[in-house]
Image (spheres, coloured by chain):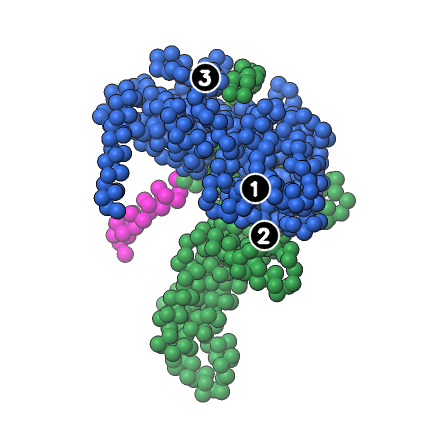
Amino acid sequence: MPHHTFFKFIWPSALAMLIFIALPIVSISIQSFFIEHEKVLVVVENCTPFGCKKETRVDIEASKVLEEEKPLGRFNWFGTYTNRNHLAFSELNQAWKESQNFNDFLGEVFNLPFYKALSFTLSYTFIVTPLVIIIGFFIALAVNRLPSFFKGPTIFICLLPMIITPLIGSLVLFWMIDAEGIIGSLLQIIFDDQNLSLKASPTLTWVMLFVYGVWHHAPFAFVVFYAGLQTIPRDALESAMIDGANRWEQTRYVIIPHLMPLAVFISLIQLMDNFRVFEPIVGFNAQASATSLSWLIYNDFRSGDGDMLFGSAAATSILTIIGISILMTPVIVRTWSANKPVIGAR
Amino acid sequence: MFFKTILTAGAIGLLSTASYAGCGIDSGSVRIGGNDFPAYQAVAEAASQCSGGGVTVSVDLNKDHKDRQVASLTANPAEFTSSLANNSALSALMNDGLVRPLNNLIAKHASGLQDMQFVTVDGEVMAIAYMANAQHLFYRSDILDAAGVAPPKTYEEVLAAAKTIKDKGLMEYPIAGTYAGWNLGLEFINMYLGHGGEFFESGSAKPAVNNSKGVATLNMMKSLTEYMNPDFLTYDSNAVQADWEAGKVALTNLWGSRAGPVTDGEGSTPEIESNTKFTSAPTVAGGSRPATTLWWDGFTVATNISDEDAEATFKAMMNGISMQMAVANAEKANWLIKGAQPNPAGVGVLASASGGALPYPMLPYFGAMHSAIGAEIVDFLQGNETAEKALEDVEAAYIAAATEKGFL
């Protein structure tokens, strides 16, 4: 393809990527190095319906002068990244020195907001992603064998969890698993324990969020695998049958290798999606037991009456991007090296 | 039915034309934004009666108003000409100079305001308050009678009453509290003030909550949670109200603005409603101050709008907080407006205020403290760490946020 044709073809996408992907990332990385100016404080008398009191307030004029000089704020280098609400280097160092054994140290680490969120985010990613792939695969196999009359309705029902908006889906489940709800009270009857509550225990909250994640994402894996199953060459399956392969062996040696590229694709998408887990935490009101990196960003924007911590949110965003890149590297390297001989063969 | 609708519509039309004449505004754009609950709706509704002729009044109430207020008033011209605010919202707005002093407008257009309604900062009136709110004790008189205990005056008595109710098998979880997220932070603030605690080293923004009063506060909160539904960390005001109306709770420290809704003849049984009683927030640890914070709600006028719009907004809002509005909506709030009748469901707020409860602090860095508390004491309530460690975490989280905001 001549260069100018290629350029004509690609420039709208390149421009869109520049505006919607590259520029925001540059902008937040700049933002993450700055913190707000030191506020000029004055003590004044405040009067409210409940009486008068000397209280501190921000001197608006003096603060404005500072702000006009340097609108971005104070340059803070990696100060925001290393403070207690993010990577917390000095706290880690201190915990290492002071803790008696490794368990103590871990306790201290997971008490820090960033590491607490990271531990849930990673657990969620690594538990939900494989389960989604496995369950999606088996649903696809099962649906594929149904008589064609039932296929349409079954596929529609299987897709429902994905069609429902995540927030609504999690709210529906939230009420179902309530101690008064249908699932919650059923569990109480099954385990014969009146005090059993999924929302009260951190462990059960985690399990509940994992189950929600699998429920919500499995249809995606299912629909991709189902499409893949339609492309399996009949002759390969038939020759396997002639060779005496039973159903499991057909699946193991014909279907799975054929669908492998799809599994890689799904795990890529799922790793990205699950690392950004957010809606179920809000929907389940689960922030007391489980927080994620995305939730930390959201919290920076909601803490205090609209007083947003832009620098802190930007730093967490950059750390999230770094986290996703690290997670995806093995998968991308694998795809790339797997594709090379194919390209060469052409 | 159809005919009736037309008649009603006609009547409303007539009414609004009549009161429009009374607002005395010639032109301008009035845009009101605020939190969404019945009392605010009543004020906004009365203010929008001024719409007509050259004046447009638009109302946008949203329960997440606190998250958008700073952004929407920073725009020039501001999205809202008036933001309905309270103690903590006003500090956030004033930190960035987003609301204008009202002294001139008051001199020109206000009459019949009571002095207590002026929220002044350094001599400048920044907001005009129209209602008071506070969390206070709700109790079920029938359950307390059956248990043979008097309405509790202190948190120690609340615990004792809850124990009796539970031991007699009257209720499984007799206490409820708003213990989720932001609300949890406020519960700590209430209880800590009840213990006589100070949040900062005097005259600075340095935190000072890690002390014996802080530990006592946390221990009291933990003792209360032992009589709560195990899901207590997911309970906000709506959830507590739902459990109350379902008759599952006998004691709770809930907002004055919920007192009307739990006795309004809807969503509950007459038996529960007639036995729902209100009183002052309890004191704690031998203190004399009710463990709660007082909140005022008022209106502000934005800085980034034309003087003409500011004047129109002020006049429309004065109409919004008129005596007629307060009389017509007596049950919706504790109005601070002159001529308003006392609200029967408002005894709890008044009792807490006359008991000497403190107002929620209007400090520019208090929002950061509130968030840090709400996030960091959870581990203690779940039994994962000691009270001292939780308070140490609160201070550390606050220092990180306050440093970024430029207060330390």
Image mark for residue B114: 3
- Seen at 49% across and 81% down, the residue is A247
Question: How many callouts does the rendering have?
Answer: 3
Colour blue, chain: B
Q: Secondary structure at mark 2?
A: loop
Viewer-proximal residue among B373 and B300: B300
What amino acid is at disc 2? Lys
What amino acid is at disc 1? Asn
Image mark for residue A328: none
Viewer-proximal residue among B224 and A68: B224
Spatial CA span between label 3 and label 1? 35 Å
Q: Position of residue A265 (x, y in %)?
A: 44, 61
When the figure is inspected, residue B137 is found, relative to residue B198, above or below; the finding is below
Q: Where does the magenta region start and end?
A: A1-23
What amino acid is at disc 3? Gln
Q: Secondary structure at mark 1?
A: loop
User: Which residue is situated farthest in the right direction here?
Assistant: A100
Tell me if residue B340 is in the magenta stretch: no
Image mark for residue B275: 1
Viewer-proximal residue among B64 and A87: B64
Q: Position of residue A208 (x, y in %)?
A: 56, 57
